[in-house]
Amino acid sequence: MNWPVEHQQPRWPDLGELADVESTLGDLPSLVSPRDCDDLRRRLASVARGEGFLLQGGDCAELFTAPLTEPTENKLRCLADMAAVLTSGSGLPTLTVGRLAGQYAKPRSASTETKDGRTLPVYRGDAVNDVRFDTKSRTPDPLRLLAAYRAADGILSDIRRLRMRNRALFTDLGGSFFTSHEALLLPYETALTKVDPASGQKYGLSGHLLWIGERTRQLDGPHVAFAAAVSNPVAVKIGPTTTRTDIAKLIELIDPRREPGRLTFITRLGANAVHDRLPLLVDEVLAQGSPATWVCDPMHGNTYTTPDGIKTRRFEAIWAEIRGFFEVHRALGTHPGGLHLELTSRDVTECVGSHSPVLERDLHLRYESACDPRLNGAQALELARLVAPLLRPASQGLEVLEDAATRG
Ligand code: PEP
Ligand code: CO
């Protein structure tokens, strides 16, 4: 069956072929283990308690060829450098999670793209079609789901190798490293969902942390149902139209038992809306007695298109949304638990601004992203340097409050 458009599934031309691929995928070994998913859930629970900070980052859309242009080691090094800055500046351990080894599918605002008078299906990520603009490339191909599995498997092997070989890297990564992606393509995700014989629980074993995107978080939709059915830690992206009722119902559906570490809300409100919208969402989470982890995605609410038609984001807007996120959480006494970033170690020109500024007129020079604009390595590190002190006063502030409490 082809899903209604709001569920963001490709129009697969041959559903029989899709079914064959699903059955092949179902017979392949799981990419991650339930035990590691549980480990991440415990670590996210400690982040939610204010005992750590989550750094989640990577490409907007991973390409199958990515390891050739940006070796996995470079991606991990970039996150490790940021984590080291955050940890040494704040005193809080950093939990690192890559937006990788599965980030091969993209939700899109329009289902077609027109260029030079030709209209073709939009690029939906390497797991679906090819970014090149011709009919063959843009036709969804279910065999790409198998290629996505193999690409993810290759990156997970790289990570295992690096863990053995490069202790310094893993020390900077905080001692562990987990994978995450948007659980968008239902055939891929459900084929890789297995019952763990040890616990009898179902897990989505395509990645450790799976998230539901802003466009597919319908309360009665198949993505939220998928998130509710698996025992992984899961996240939901929430944008400026999110209501209190949405929050209450998401908690009821996904985390009815209020398990610490189970549910993360990734807010992507935009620098202008964060002060307005975040307080009521946080208030609703508190009213529900939910231990949800709060993470700020300062990227997706701050995208704009230049007069030349290039999609970009201003470093200053990204930084402003992060500051707003911290201010709101500080005011409400909740923990600003982490950051979700689109970034690359490469010296790309995709986001404008920062210390060694990329200007709008430079964007075409090294714009390599297949989808949204990413921070380059220097911009990412600069952001970590700015954020670290925001974490520090909090723990000191907390100690002062705790001292006052124990003195009576
Ligand atoms: C993304 O993370 O690339 C994305 C599409 O985000 P959102 O669902 O928040 O729009
Ligand atoms: Co994106």
Image: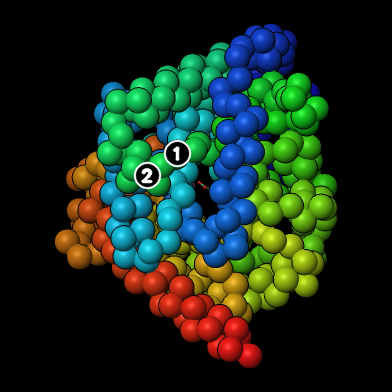
Residue 357 vertical position relative to residue 368 in the rendered view, above or below: below
Residue 81 visible within the image: yes
Q: Label 2, secondary structure: give it.
A: loop
Furthest-left residue in view? 356
Residue 123 visible within the image: no
Q: Residue at x 37, y 29 (%)?
A: 163
Q: Residue at x 31, y 60 (%)?
A: 88
Q: Position of residue 319 (x, y in %)?
A: 37, 68
- Between 186 and 368, which is closer to the camera in this rendering? 186
Determine whether, in the image, residue 134 is placed left or right of residue 164: right
Marks 1 and 2: CB-CB under 8 Å?
A: yes
Furthest-front residue in view? 407
Q: Amino acid at mark 1?
A: Phe
Quadrant occupied by the C terminus: bottom right
Residue 406 vertical position relative to residue 273 in the rendered view, above or below: below
Determine whether, in the image, residue 22 is placed left or right of residue 372: right
Q: Position of residue 149 (x, y in %)?
A: 53, 20
Q: Position of residue 246 (x, y in %)?
A: 76, 61
Q: Residue at x 81, y 52 (%)?
A: 257
Q: Which mark is residue 177?
A: 1
Q: CA distance from mark 1 to mark 2?
A: 7 Å
Q: Amino acid at mark 2?
A: Leu
Q: How many marks?
A: 2
Dividing the picture into quadrants, the one containing residue 239 is bottom right
Label 2 Cα neighbours within 10 Å, binned few <14 / some 14-19 / many ≥20: many
The residue tagged 2 is 173
